Amino acid sequence: MINKLTTTLIFLFFPLFIFSQYSNYERGYSKGWQEGYCYENKEIACIPPTSPQPPLPTIEESSNSFKDGYLKGFQHGLAEPNSTPGYASTNDRNRYKYPEEVYKPDINQLALQVLSNRSRTSGRSSYAQRKDWVYGQAYPRLKRFDRVEKKLFKKGQKEDRRNRKKLKNKEIESLSSLTNGWYKSYIKIRTSFGKKKENFWFEKFVQVHNGKLINYIGRGDVIFPIVAFNKTYDGFQITPRFPDGNEEQKWVIKIIDSQPTTDLIEFDEPQHVMFYVTSDNGGGEVQVFIKGDVNRSSNIDKILYGRPSCDRSTGVAKMFLKPGKYEYFAYNKQSFWEGEIEVGNRCLSMQLTTN
């Protein structure tokens, strides 16, 4: 009887013994390698192969560090043959050209961003408990986000009142009479806060070249090429092109100055940022919020089977930002994400992963 019991205990604990042979570094390497391998895959289901045998930790690395192993594994997995994301540009030689070079982020920083995008779920087991915990995390951040949005909305109301006075009884300049250069202009944008929706006139700049509107400096001081325009009863309707190739937005602008501005025009190139998910945690749609000089929010309403292409228009939380560091948070009914991203890649895709 004792021999049988001993044999049973050996078999019960044998798997635990085998599992314990893998260090935190090795487990991190395996996970990082698989996520690095799949990072560049787009629109297809990525099933990574078994990760190779991890190398021995270097002097600077620790065998007890999951993070050190993950960074090394991610770098090795990313080195496998993959495609590189592209971005939209315009062929009109007079319009602003998006640079040909593609920004290459630091691999370690990229891996840290992917690692930090794992959700926090509080360790609670039931659906209701996780939901309550997530809302407890999201609510105070949403309140702060709304306070900023409310201030921006009130600021927009004041600017709109000032600009309407400037525009009152002013004649709209004809493009054919304008010399080449940047002109102060006023753009009408539908703005909302909560249930309030109003049309505000904001002061911006547009570039005129040979009787055409060719570039527009928009929200956050980022530049967009204008691909089409036409005269309307209250100004010009313009169609800007966004970095993902989208040309659906149409805005009305007014130019009342007869001479180009002598001010130094400063602007940044628009950076295309997308958040996405590839697995369903049962929490439904994911709300994503970016905090910065100009707040941004969007939502993820689809599960993708791989990294989205730069021209993806659905299923991702998409934003256009100027280069810099931004804090973000995201949540659905079962997961909460929070972290920081550094925007400098023309097309940056960030996966929110669930535990």
Image: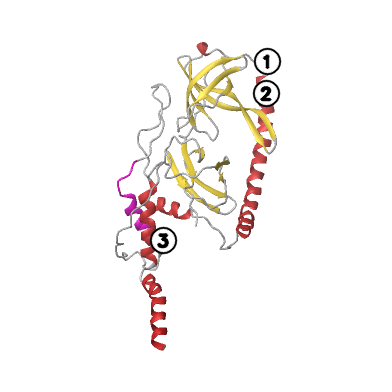
The answer to whether marks 1 and 3 mark residues whose Cβ atoms lie closer than 8 Å is no
Q: Is residue 284 above or below residue 230?
A: below
- Residue 295 in the magenta stretch? The answer is no
Q: Residue 274, how many percent across, how many down?
A: 48, 41
- Say which residue label 2 marks: 164
The amino acid sitting under disc 3 is Lys
- Numbered disc 2: secondary structure: helix
Q: Quadrant of residue 164?
A: top right
Residue sitting at 30 percent across and 59 percent down? 52
- Numbered disc 3: secondary structure: helix
Residue sitting at 46 percent across and 38 percent down? 272
The Cα–Cα distance between marks 3 and 2, rounded to whole angstroms, is 56 Å
First reached walking from the N terminus: tag 1 or tag 3: 3
Q: Quadrant of residue 84?
A: top left
Q: Residues within 10 Å of mark 2 (few under 14, many from 20)?
A: some
Residue 256, visible in the rendered structure = no
- Say which residue label 1 marks: 169
Taking depth in this image into account, of 120 and 323 the one nearest to the observer is 120
Q: Which residues are magenta?
A: 71-83
Residue sitting at 64 percent across and 41 percent down? 149
First reached walking from the N terminus: tag 3 or tag 2: 3
Q: Quadrant of the N terminus?
A: bottom left
- Say which residue label 3 marks: 67
